Image (tube, rainbow, N blue to C red):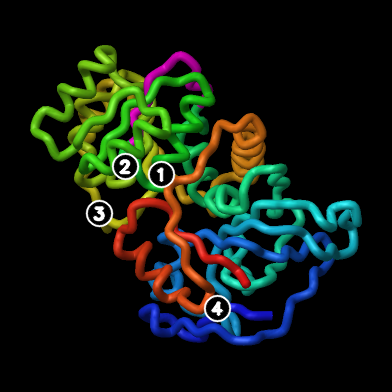
Amino acid sequence: MLAAIYSETGGSDVLRVEEVPTPSPGPGEVRVRLRVAGVNPTDWKARAGETGGVAFDFQVPGQDGAGEIDAVGSGVDESRVGERVWVYFAAWRRQWGTAAQYCVVPAQQAVPLGSASFDLGASLGIPALTAYHCLLADGPIDGQTVLVAGGAGAVGHAAIELARWSGADVVATVSGPEKAELARAAGASAVVNYRSEGAADEVRAFAPDGVSRIVELALGPNLPLDLAVIAPHGVIATYAADQATAEIPVRPLMAPNLTLRFVLVYTIPREALRAAVEGVSQALAVGALTCLPVHRFALEDVAGAHDAVQGGAVGKVVIDLP
């Protein structure tokens, strides 16, 4: 099969596209003929060595993708062959990521896609599961108001749609008009430029009693705004670690009994992961999830796809598999 691989960490120039042996599914596994692979920040960070070295003779990057199951291992129902699925965690401590014609994953990591597009399927995985856990790990949000920071990003987009599906109202923060339009299209009732001096007042005008949950991608710089708008007993769930440190003011968090939750979706409790997969699947089934504008790359330009994500492309970067 054709696959993007790297044998050492570094810049995107370590990626190469080669013919490699097609993997076979082991017990409890399925093989997926991939059609579209999603590209996330975690992919280029792993390739760059920010999360460790290469554990195999080569690594196929890519956690998320969509395609059809074409083979199953022992213990997996043969009726799954031909099923359209979305894939998550493909390269998490495994060799066969989604930037390839085929990948092998545990059967539960190939989730029924139904009639949804492969583009949407490849956009779920890390972003949607992260968003679900940030929103709902601390209980239902029906009838509440939540704040989604970075409402035009992949996690932010999924968080807005999942919050609305869960019965919450949403205010999103963005950095400019183009991103504001994407947040509104996802269902945010109010959109605020977090760079404006009156950002906290704008959020409070929409949510006078404060927001009950905050899905946060930049804890360090955004924490003052979060503390200014969160309601007592609220939860700030932060999922990105682009800032090495954040200064945490104890009293402003302690007095209103706030919860500061750190989320790395790969290591959330297994029961929480199952809940997130089930919740995302339910939202998908009723059409509550949509895809951001797509930036398409051929497999041969996998380096360009990684560079686009690292450069902050607005929208979803995907790779079409030949």
Which callout, 4 or 3, points at the residue further toward the start of the chain?
Answer: 4
Residue 227 lies left or right of residue 284; in this view the side is left
Graded by Cα atoms within 10 Å as few (under 14), some (14 to 19) or many (20 or more), the crowding at tag 3 reads: few
Residue 183 in the image: state x and y as whole percent.
35, 36
Query: Which numbered marker is on residue 150?
Result: 2
From this view, report whether residue 182 is shown above or below residue 265: above
Frontmost residue, 300 versus 258: 300
Residue 93 in the image: state x and y as whole percent.
59, 67
Reply yes or no: does residue 143 show up in magenta.
yes
Residue, disc 1: 262
Which callout, 4 or 1, points at the residue further toward the start of the chain?
Answer: 4
Give the quadrant of the N terminus: bottom right
Whether residue 23 is visible = yes
Which callout, 1 or 3, points at the residue further toward the start of the chain?
Answer: 3
Q: Looking at numbered disc 2 in the image, what kind of residue is underneath it?
A: Gly
Magenta segment boundaries in residue numbering: 139-148
Q: Nearer the viewer, mark 4 or mark 1?
A: 4
Graded by Cα atoms within 10 Å as few (under 14), some (14 to 19) or many (20 or more), the crowding at tag 2 reads: many
Residue, disc 3: 245
